[in-house]
Image (cartoon, rainbow, N blue to C red):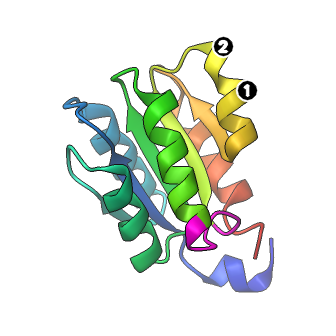
Amino acid sequence: MSADQEQRTIRCLVAKVGLDGHDRGAQVIARAFRDAGFEVIYSGLHRSPDEIVQAAVQEDVDVLGISILSGAHNTLIPKVVDGLEGYNALEDTLIILGGIIPDDDEAELKQMGVAEVFGPGTPMEETVTFVRDNAGKAE
């Protein structure tokens, strides 16, 4: 980790994409990130992939954490990744997913640019440590 990153606060966007209306997990992780000293922006519910991309780019976030429980990850996540790529922001944005993602889908999501998938029951400290260890590595 560079000296610049140690002094700079990690900026995170915690996002709910699509029609998924369950946001307890997103709120819990947003609070855990804030308690860890990260700057956190929460998207609110029912955001389109484009709205998530716009927020991530405009807020210049280091981390995009997407919570998805709807089963639409194979449709929505590629749209977010493509949108970030369109702004040349994909390499500078650590994308993590939380929620219900079948193991069979993880490899494909990671191949397209998702850094890690955290399922239900993942200890908060594991997620926080992953973000600390990996945010800003492309810079």
Residue 135 in the image, given as x and y percentages of width and height = 66, 62
Mark seen at residue 48 = none
Question: What residue lies at 33% left-to-right and 41% top-to-bottom?
Answer: 26
Q: Nearer the viewer, residue 12 or 75?
A: 75
In the rendered structure, the answer to whether residue 135 lies left or right of residue 9 reads right
**Label 1, residues with CA under 10 Å away: few <14, some 14-19, many ≥20:** few
Contact, mark 2 vs mark 1 (Cβ under 8 Å): yes
Say which element carries label 2: helix
Q: Would you name the residue on which mark 1 appears?
A: 107
Residue 117 located within the stretch drawn in magenta:
no
Q: Nearer the viewer, residue 90 or 100?
A: 90
Residue 100 in the image, given as x and y percentages of width and height = 45, 20
Q: Quadrant of the C terminus?
A: bottom right
Whole-angstrom CA distance, mark 2 to mark 1, is: 7 Å
Question: What residue lies at 60% left-to-right and 32% top-to-bottom?
Answer: 117
Q: Would you name the residue on which mark 2 appears?
A: 104
Residue 91 located within the stretch drawn in magenta:
yes
Please identify the quarter of the rendering in which residue 105 is found: top right
Q: Is residue 91 above or below residue 29?
A: below
Residue 13 in the image, given as x and y percentages of width and height = 41, 60
In the rendered structure, the answer to whether residue 129 lies left or right of residue 59 reads right
In the rendered structure, the answer to whether residue 27 lies left or right of residue 72 reads left
Give amino acid for label 2.
Asp
- What's the magenta bit mostly, secondary-structure-wise? loop
Q: Which residues are magenta?
A: 86-92
Camera sees residue 122: yes
